[in-house]
Each structure stands twice: as C-alpha cells, then as structure tokens.
Amino acid sequence: MGFFRLLFFGALIYLVFRLVKGALGSHKGIDRRRTNGVIDEMVQDPNCKTYIPRRDAHRRRVAGNEYFFCSKTCADTYEVEMKR
C-alpha cells in the first residue's frame, strides 16, 4: 500500500510540475512563424572552408562571382590568391 501511495504522489507531483512549466511559457524555442521556417542559410568561406550564416558573411565579388567570407582577412587572402 505504501509503494502505491508513493507512486501516486510522485506522478501527481510530476504532472503538476509539467502543468506549471507549460503555463509559465518557459519555452525557449525559435518562433518559426516570424522566420517563415528558415533561420538562416549557411554559406562556406572558399578560403578557410568555414561555414557561417549568410547574414553575417563578408561579401566580395571576385572575377565576376559573389563569394561569402568569414572575415575581411579571408576575403583579402582569397582575392590575392585568385589574382595569381
């Protein structure tokens, strides 16, 4: 009898905890309605092969093509290498 009482109260406490947690809105997820389901596109730096979010990338046109770089240093290095 004691075991079932302990099990019952444990389940009750767990359910109350879940309800309170849900009611307080402790959800830390991304609001996909605001972002249309897309967070950000990742692009690869052609110089160091690092992936970075497109919105944070340094853009540079080299030989008529647009490239995305993680930093100004990588962009400058790549441009010098392409001119050789």
Image: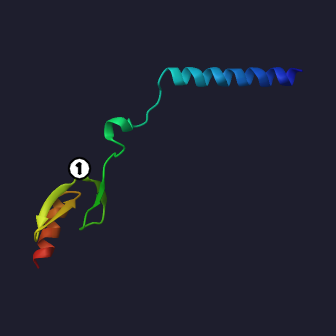
* Quarter occupied by the N terminus: top right
* Quarter occupied by the C terminus: bottom left
Depicted 64 relative to depicted 59: above or below: below
Q: 55 left or right of 1?
A: left
- Residue at (18% x, 55% y) in the render: 58
Depicted 82 relative to depicted 59: above or below: below
Residue 50: image location, x then y, percent? 31, 61
Q: Residues within 10 Å of mark 1 (few under 14, many from 20)?
A: some
- Residue at (87% x, 21% y) in the render: 2
Relative depth, front residue between 4 and 74: 4
The coloring applied to the image is rainbow
- Residue at (63% x, 20% y) in the render: 16
Residue 70: image location, x then y, percent? 23, 57
Residue 76 picture quarter:
bottom left
Q: Residue furthest bottom?
A: 84
Q: Amino acid at mark 1?
A: Asp
Q: Residue furthest right?
A: 1
Residue 44 picture quarter:
bottom left
Q: Secondary structure at mark 1?
A: helix
What residue sits right under mark 1 in the picture?
56
Residue 42: image location, x then y, percent? 31, 55
- Residue at (47% x, 27% y) in the render: 26
Q: 78 left or right of 38?
A: left
Q: How many dots with numbers?
A: 1
Depicted 36 relative to depicted 41: above or below: above
